[in-house]
């Protein structure tokens, strides 16, 4: 199955999004299609053998919409110097085309540029440039096409065109309104010119209105071309409603003008040109404001994309060479001076400094870096000069992955949006039927044609499927963007909604509640071995282990400058410990379960082990040749923010539990320090997901917070998996939310953000549904039945325009969200 995201243009309301989903889902091989109206993207899963991507794009275009082709990341433009004729261009094209991995090459002699599409896995930019230079030409600095800039330019152009159309329509629409309304308002101090008096010169009055209406109609021509096309294709949208309503007003007004021309001067009361003109003007104003507001919802992603530096100083043959960022390759040695941005991800090989990583983690304090430490693209080098080796470039950097994650999240839909999607699919046809029935009912009841026409136009114009379509995606875009700003990466609308429902959180102990960097605190030996020998044997055995407790023992031996002995027959026993052979000694190093299983007597060490466990230390038992040799106690420091985070979660009404493979006494001692009452101790790594299942079986909505590979199954099993940013890639892949910092206060912040976003979505949906439920009956004349006023179509258009803008404005309030402090 292929997964793809396609940028779609020409959508004007939620009904358009529904239409695209409908036609694309009918294609053979398409398993899922979801259109996000706010981001204007179609997310699709399909079988490429049954339906190629070109067929999907053709189907979208056939439905009346456009497909915006996005430039592939491995498409580059290389300026070339030294070409003197078309034959030179052919020579370069031929040479580059022979490179393995180059899919397409096109050299334009007039612009002196080569456009190359290539496979990053098979060839590098530097290789392409070398071939050009070998052919006798000069490969100049790369110009890489930037999707962000192209998208920004396109959006800005769109907004400029909308504002221009509004100003043109307002320029003619305001005089049109003045001309039509002033003669009816006798008490105004100013009046229309005498030659335009409707009672004396009705035909001139009507013809001038036609002249003023035509430019307004031209400014809003898209409502007619798109609206009627959608109507012909039996999938009416918001444009269809505007087109039908204003066309009815114009046609009736033209008929009235004809009546006036043949002498029926009473027909002047049937002129409704100003209704059509002002409706279009107001809706163009609403669309312009909507486009501006929609742009603001995606500011977070633009901010992230703008963080990456454009160039890097690479050391080649001992020289400092400034290269465009796109030419930096894995393995390059990069020099970064104080105040400069880190261009790509890598590992420090020389120098030390402090780096501001707030753009990634939200943590304002600079992080000290020395040889061997990782650095990340777009972070800022504060005070030292360093050299580092590039390990990840282009789309593989942490920043690029965050941007992709946020983009995917913003393009996703939350389950709460399903009702709005279903309603918007049937909305426009139902509104058309209501408008027709209401106008006919008033006509049959004895009201005039003009009265019935007013009802018909008002119902069509007041209905707003846009507000329904924007209610959910705009809030998700702002919410996920705000989360990214504070180092909380939420992987989609579903994760955002499920987080809001969480009532139980299970924390892994090591590396999550604690720092994950334990230290040796006590060494207790039996009578026939020294503490140094015990520590040496244990450290030699644990040297190959990746367990934090094993690493602590190795660090302890290194501190005491003990020699690490050669190990043979290493065997890891998951959840228990290890078995090794060192200098002819068969050693067992692990927990009490391992000793009991091998039937090794612990003699008088049990009471001492219990005492250590009661202090929050983890006792590791060492047996040599099936006889207990001693205990090494290791303690892990509790993170500074753990107790506050747990207290905050409990104040939010969430039950907190801790899960660990440690013995119960040690686990309970740690739990007591941070205020956790429920402890799941001595749980083997493979059983963590079963413990989560047990809690879910009790009807609880469970979140699991962890950082290691052994947490991945539990993270996947939980309703919401939350991975700590300092953890492993596997844990992050399995999680629904990734916390870029190791600060546990981000857990209550993530839940608070989820609650704020879902509350905002509910407010938006309430307003969108409430507006339509109340507005349509009023437009249909409900108040008039009880002696109230009749809604003028102009006010209906103003209300419709404001409804979309109000939904967007409410979503933008989320930008004021602030995280919990330590």
Image: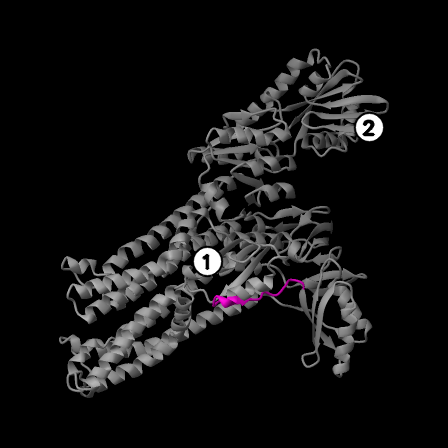
Q: Is residue 216 visible?
A: yes
Identify the residue at image location x=72%, y=46%: 372
Secondary structure category for the residue under label 2: strand
Q: Earlier in the sequence, mark 1 or mark 2?
A: 1
Please give the label number shown on residue 734.
none
Colouring style: one colour
Give how far across and how far down residue 32 sits, in percent.
Answer: 53, 52
Please give the label number shown on residue 297.
1
Q: Quadrant of residue 212?
A: bottom left
Asked if residue 275 lies left or right of residue 571, the reply is: left
Identify the residue at image location x=62%, y=47%: 367
Q: CA distance from mark 1 to mark 2?
A: 59 Å
Q: Main secondary structure of the magenta part?
A: loop
Q: Residues within 10 Å of mark 2 (few under 14, many from 20)?
A: few
Asked if residue 453 lies left or right of residue 148, the reply is: left
Q: Which residues are magenta?
A: 61-74
Q: Quadrant of residue 279?
A: bottom left
The residue furthest bottom is 195
Which residue is denoted by mark 2 in the rendering? 569
Secondary structure category for the residue under label 1: helix
Q: Residues within 10 Å of mark 1 (few under 14, many from 20)?
A: many
Identify the residue at image location x=19%, y=66%: 443
Q: Quadrant of residue 75?
A: bottom right
- Is 209 part of what is drawn in magenta? no
């Amino acid at each position: 199955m292929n997964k793809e995201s396609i940028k779609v243009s020409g959508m004007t309301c939620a009904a358009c999004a529904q239409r695209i989903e409908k036609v694309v889902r009918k294609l053979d091989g398409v398993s899922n299609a979801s259109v996000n109206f706010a981001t204007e993207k179609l997310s699709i899963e399909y079988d490429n053998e049954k339906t190629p991507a070109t067929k999907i794009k053709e189907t979208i275009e056939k439905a009346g919409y456009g497909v915006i082709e996005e430039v592939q990341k491995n498409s580059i433009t290389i300026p070339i110097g030294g070409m003197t004729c078309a034959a030179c261009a052919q020579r370069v094209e031929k040479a580059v085309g022979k490179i393995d991995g180059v899919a397409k090459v096109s050299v334009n002699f007039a612009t002196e540029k080569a456009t190359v599409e290539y496979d990053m896995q098979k060839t590098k930019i530097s290789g392409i440039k070398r071939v050009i230079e070998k052919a006798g030409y000069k490969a100049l600095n790369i110009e890489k096409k930037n999707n962000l800039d192209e998208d920004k330019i396109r959006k800005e152009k769109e907004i400029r065109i909308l504002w221009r159309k509004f100003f043109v329509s307002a320029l003619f629409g305001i005089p049109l309104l003045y001309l039509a309304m002033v003669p009816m308002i006798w008490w105004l101090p100013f009046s229309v010119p005498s030659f335009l008096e409707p009672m004396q010169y009705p035909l001139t009055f009507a013809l001038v209105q036609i002249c003023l209406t035509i430019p307004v109609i031209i400014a809003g021509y898209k409502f007619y071309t798109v609206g009627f096309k959608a109507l012909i294709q039996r999938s009416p949208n918001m444009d269809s409603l505007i087109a039908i309503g204003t066309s009815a007003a114009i046609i009736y007004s033209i008929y009235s003008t004809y009546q006036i021309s043949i002498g029926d001067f009473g027909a002047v009361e049937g002129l409704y040109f100003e209704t059509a003109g002002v409706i279009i003007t107001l809706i163009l104003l609403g669309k312009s404001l909507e486009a501006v507001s929609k742009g603001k919802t995606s500011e977070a992603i633009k901010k992230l994309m703008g963080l990456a530096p454009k160039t890097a100083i690479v050391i080649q043959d001992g020289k400092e060479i400034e290269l465009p960022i796109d030419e930096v390759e894995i393995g390059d040695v990069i020099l970064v001076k104080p105040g400069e941005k880190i261009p790509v991800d890598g590992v420090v090989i020389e120098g030390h400094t402090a780096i501001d990583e707030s753009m990634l983690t939200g943590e304002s304090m600079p992080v000290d870096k020395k040889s061997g430490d990782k650095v990340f693209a777009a972070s800022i080098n504060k005070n030292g000069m360093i050299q580092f080796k590039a390990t990840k470039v282009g789309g593989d950097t942490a920043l690029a992955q965050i941007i992709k994650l946020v983009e995917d999240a913003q393009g996703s839909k939350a389950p709460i949006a399903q009702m709005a999607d279903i309603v918007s699919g049937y909305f426009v046809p139902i509104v058309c039927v209501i408008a027709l029935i209401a106008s006919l009912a008033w006509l049959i009841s004895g009201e005039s044609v003009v009265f019935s026409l007013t009802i018909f136009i008002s119902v069509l114009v007041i209905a707003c499927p846009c507000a329904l379509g924007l209610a959910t995606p705009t809030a998700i875009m702002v919410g996920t963007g705000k989360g990214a700003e504070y180092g909380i990466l939420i992987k989609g609308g579903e994760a955002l909604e499920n987080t809001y429902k969480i009532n139980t959180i299970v924390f892994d102990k090591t590396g999550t509640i604690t720092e994950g960097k334990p230290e040796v605190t006590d060494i207790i030996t039996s009578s026939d071995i020294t503490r140094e020998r015990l520590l040496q044997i244990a450290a030699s055995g644990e040297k190959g282990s990746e367990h934090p407790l094993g690493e602590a023992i190795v660090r302890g031996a290194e501190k005491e400058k003990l020699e690490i002995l050669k190990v043979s027959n290493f065997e890891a026993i998951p959840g228990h410990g290890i078995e090794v052979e060192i200098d002819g000694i068969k050693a067992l190093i692990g927990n009490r379960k391992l000793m009991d299983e091998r039937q090794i007597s612990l003699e008088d060490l049990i009471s001492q082990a219990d005492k250590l466990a009661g202090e929050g230390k983890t006792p590791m038992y060492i047996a040599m040749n099936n006889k207990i040799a001693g205990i090494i106690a290791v303690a892990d420091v509790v993170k500074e923010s753990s107790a506050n985070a747990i207290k905050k979660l409990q104040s939010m009404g969430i039950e907190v539990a801790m899960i660990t493979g440690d013995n119960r006494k040690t686990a309970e001692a740690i739990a007591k320090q941070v205020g956790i009452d429920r402890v799941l101790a001595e749980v083997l790594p493979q059983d963590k997901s079963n413990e989560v299942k047990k809690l879910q079986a009790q009807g609880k909505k469970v979140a699991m917070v962890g950082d290691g590979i052994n947490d991945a199954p539990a993270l996947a099993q939980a309703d919401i998996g939350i991975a700590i940013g300092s953890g492993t890639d596997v844990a992050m892949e399995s999680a629904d939310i990734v916390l870029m910092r190791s600060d546990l206060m981000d857990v209550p912040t993530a839940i608070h953000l989820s609650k704020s976003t879902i509350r905002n979505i509910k407010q938006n949906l309430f307003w969108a549904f409430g507006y339509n439920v109340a507005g349509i009956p009023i437009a249909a004349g409900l108040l008039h039945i009880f002696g109230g006023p009749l809604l003028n179509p102009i006010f209906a258009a103003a209300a419709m325009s404001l409804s979309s803008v109000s939904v967007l404005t409410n979503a933008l309030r989320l930008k004021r969200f602030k995280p919990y402090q330590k």
